[in-house]
Amino acid sequence: MPVENNFQHDDLSRKNPGERLFVSELKPTAKVGSPAWCDAMAQCGRRLSDAGVRAIIFSHGSIHGTDVFGMQRLDEAGGVKRGYSRGVSGLDALLSLMREGDNGIPPFPGGEKPPFPNDEKTQAWLDGQVGDAGNFTRAYVMLAHRALNGQATRPLLCVRWLWRSEHHHLGRVIAAVELLDSLQALCERHCFEAGERILVQAHGQAGLVLALVSNFLCSSPVTGRSELLRILTSYAVQTQQLELADTVARLERSIERGAFLNGVILDVVTLGAPVRYGWDPSGIGKLLHIVNHRHLRTDGKIWLAKMELPQMTVEMPVAWGGDYVQQLAVAGSDALPATEEAKAANKAVWEIVEPYDGFERWLECARRAVRFPTEGRCFLVDYKDCTGSQNVRDHYYGHAAYTRMDAMLFNTFEILRVLYDSDVSPSLRGDSGAAGG
């Protein structure tokens, strides 16, 4: 997408990413917590520190309770109810498999729903419910902090950030503003200086939140930013959300001063983020997209997912082709806001950030089978989570693998290799094989 992208949707290009594309597979590393594992993580921490990274933000939401495939909007827009799926072989079965109540992802006890607050109580509760499946647990972040700082030339902060998990445009824009506010406070609290870096690892739709952040951080006075902030202010006042109104006001003052994050550079790694909002490359530093993917196509276009019906409904329950949530939660899908005020604000945001709407548009976007946005490096990884199990909680349709504890060292190696161009030797990996490229 162009500089001054102004919140445009990604163009969903099917072209070969060329030199942007990297390919690998999850390989065994030293046992988590072992001396060899800790030594490897410590050396990785030193390399990150030498690259100027001062903090790592582990950002995620909740898979449970969130209509992860966005079927509410598809049903509202028509779908099976209006017969739009007729004539498309296997589509009825696919939509049924995606729908809450039928997709095997149980609701939370008590039926808790978003928005989820980013506090220790909620994070601990989420850890107890889902563990490390699509969730950066407290244990994960604490272990990463301890291990990465074993040899770091400067301390690396490791921070967990649970976003609201409201899978609609309004929820994601609010989350983007809240994240920017949190990052600004972090920079000021720890006296980060211009040119230093914060690395954000964003799982699932948290990656969409970061795409919006990149547009907010554009140094030019793009029109979409002021309009979105106006919509949020109006919504906050109307619903008497004083904290949100204050957050928006602080961001507006930072924009007026041109004081974004004190000059700190934001590097982003997305993990299984659907391709929707366009990225503004002028607003951030380095950008990498990691997708759990297995090559099932017969035309040699390994950078595209397979989208064939009705075979997909057979493959999905065992995550045969990789991350199906990343592939199917595209434009046109979404959860529905809970109130009339939120629905009205969501529609206003929607008209700015995503021109695609309607059931047919979702089907068109899904069938394009695009794995990566137009901007950033592209990394296909087979996380080896297709074990034949039809228990959704073992893999969450390929969407859970990125945050597993035993993938931490592998992810860190590959982020260094692909994002920071720091080659990783077999001896550093703590195993007998280096990653393929």
Image (cartoon, rainbow, N blue to C red):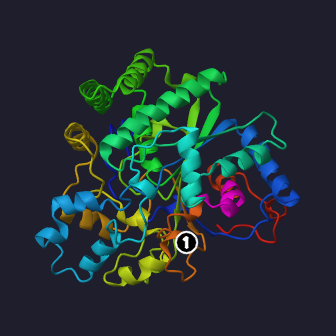
Does residue 205 appear in this view?
Answer: yes
Disc 1 designates what residue?
394
Residue 258 lies, in percent from the top left, at 46, 19
Residue at 60% across / 52% down in the picture? Answer: 136
Residue at 22% across / 49% down in the picture? Answer: 355
Q: Which SS does the magenta portion mostly show?
A: helix
Q: Quadrant of residue 402?
A: bottom right
Residue 54 lies, in percent from the top left, at 68, 34
Q: Is the residue 43 above or below the residue 283 in the image? A: below
Residue at 43% across / 43% down in the picture? Answer: 164
Residue type at numbered disc 1 = Asp
Residue at 50% across / 62% down in the picture? Answer: 18
Q: Is residue 293 left or right of residue 71?
A: right
Q: Is residue 379 left or right of residue 77?
A: right
Does residue 201 appear in this view?
Answer: no
Quarter occupied by the C terminus: bottom right
Residues 309 and 165: in front is 165
Q: Is the residue 275 above or below the residue 299 in the image? A: above
Q: Which residues are magenta?
A: 403-412
